[in-house]
Image (spheres, grey):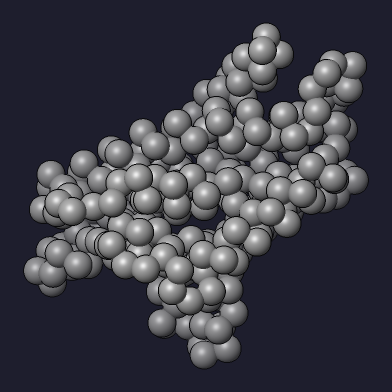
Amino acid sequence: MTMTKGLLKYHLLVLLREPLNMFFGFGLPFLQLFIMSSGLLDADNPMIMDGAMPIFVVIAAMVLCFTDSALSHGYTRQIKFLRRLRMTPVKPLGYIACGIVSRIGVLFIFAATFIAVLAGFFNMSLDGRNWPLFTAVLVLCFVMFYVIGMFVANSTKNAKNSQSLVYVVFFGLLAVGGAMFPIESMPSIMQTAAQWLPPAMAIEVLRNAWMGMDIMAGHDFIMIIILTIVFGGLSVKFFKYE
């Protein structure tokens, strides 16, 4: 228990030591919202807000998982800090699990704040929402992004190279996965590929959960579970202390 508390404290300190990541992760969705706000309001369609909200939450989750957690892990590998963990009972699975727990609360705070802003300033309705289902899906999507980020952070022998790779994967998924640009505006071949990328699948399942639709429709929910299991196993198997 003492070791677990120590790991949780460590992960929270890593998070707080990088305030720019917090600002970027949580400020970017709000910036996008207010840039788009005039067009959204002119449309006078509350369903637009329902459809847009999951996109912003996914962006925040990806920032926490990639530019915070994965990059920080690459840095701690680079400075040889994780060597010390080899001499402790801490296992890769416990290390990764504590990282997820330490950051999921931060994501909940962001999601609650963002939803409150949409409800208060943009008249998005909160009536009839299935909050337990939405919360469960949000946790699942977050875990998926987290283990993908951890796998990328451990996928190269050179820790510095892993940090560069994290940036490439992060911005690539944002750009092509429907989080930054509408999939509908992409060429047809890219649309097909984008629909199988983690951000697009997470957005679709979160949107269905938020709007009371069937989360099992299509391939998205099953693929999220598969990706979470596969990359969870890979992130543990290829975990590097240096």
Which residue is at a point 84% across and 45% down the rendered structure image? 237
Question: Camera-side residue: 21 or 90?
Answer: 90
Q: Where is 57 relative to 17, above or below?
A: below
Residue extending farthest top:
2
Count the numbered circles shown: 0
Question: Camera-side residue: 10 or 207?
Answer: 207
- Quadrant, the C terminus: top right
Image coordinates of residue 239 in percent, x first then y, are 82, 40
Which residue is at a point 72% across and 29% down the rendered structure image? 94
Residue extending farthest bottom:
188
200 relative to 153 in the view: left or right: left
Question: Camera-side residue: 48 or 20?
Answer: 48
8 relative to 44 in the view: left or right: right
Picture quadrant of residue 70? top right
Image coordinates of residue 54 in percent, x first then y, are 36, 57
Image coordinates of residue 55 in percent, x first then y, are 39, 59
Q: Where is 67 relative to 241, above or below?
A: below
Image coordinates of residue 211 in percent, x first then y, are 27, 62
- Quadrant, the N terminus: top right
